[in-house]
Amino acid sequence: MTGERRTRSTEAFFGRRRGKALRPRQSDLLERLLPRWKLDLEAPAPDRLSDIFDNAPSRIVLEIGFGGGEHLLHRAQEDPDAGFIGVEPFVNSMAKFLAAAEDAGVANIRLYDDDATRLLDWLPGACLDGIDLLYPDPWPKKKHWKRRFVNAANLDRFARVMKPGANFRFASDIDTYVNWTLAHLHAHPAFDWTARNAADWREPFEGWPGTRYEAKALREGRTPAYLTFRRR
């Protein structure tokens, strides 16, 4: 009952918090490593977001709902001078990522394990160089579309925390969600779709490592779309 009450109290997270039992190492990482990297939203947000990192990053990117964390870890390793914030409320996914991150020896990551809207409301204005939302829960039933993370309120949040020229990147293999996202971003005054031809949204982002969700979509015959929107 406690878990159910917590889920309903959030604005944008409606899924399960836990799956199968964690392995001993995963439990240890949640107790030992997560507190070191987790953002404390009870404390005031820093004037300079780079102060939350040890490496004083030149740019900071947020990934919302990183799942298994393949993309987040790849980006952190690829760009050690940048800082990456990952949000993932599902405990098992967080534990899996922590194990991979510790094995890889990355240090330019900060994490949050609850509703992403809370983090977005905590962040200082114009602090992010990018936001990634990759294969989010599509909530395919029409009665659940209101649960989709892309909505007018969250786009307002994005606009507040993104620097001018920053990119919001969205990937999905669900046509209705792709169309939904295009319609919502077209209606928002703060964003421009950067596509100039079909290849711009049919081909993966530059340096794309792939994810397990993408692999499943391709196996099942669904074609992913990769959309990039620039903050005006």
Image (tube, rainbow, N blue to C red):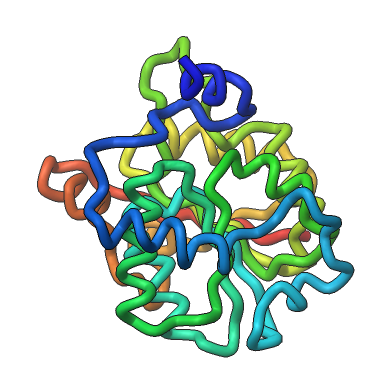
Residue at screen point 38% across, 73% down:
101
Farthest residue to the right: give it: 47
Farthest residue to the left: give it: 219
Q: Is residue 13 left or right of residue 47?
A: left
- Out of 145 and 21, give the one closest to the viewer: 21
Rendering coords of residue 196 (x, y %): 52, 62
- Out of 29 and 138, give the one closest to the viewer: 29
Quarter of the image with the C terminus in it: bottom right
Rendering coords of residue 25 (x, y %): 27, 62
Residue at screen point 81% across, 55% down:
43
Name the image quarter holding residue 83: bottom right
Name the image quarter holding residue 82: bottom right
Can the viewer see residue 112 in this picture? Answer: yes
Check the image and report above or below for 85 versus 7.
Answer: below
Check the image and report above or below for 85 versus 52.
Answer: above
Can the viewer see residue 194 in this picture? Answer: no
Rendering coords of residue 29 (x, y %): 39, 63
Name the image quarter holding residue 21: top left
Residue at screen point 53% across, 52% down:
87
Residue at screen point 48% across, 54% down:
227
Rendering coords of residue 175 (x, y %): 36, 35
Tally the marks: 0
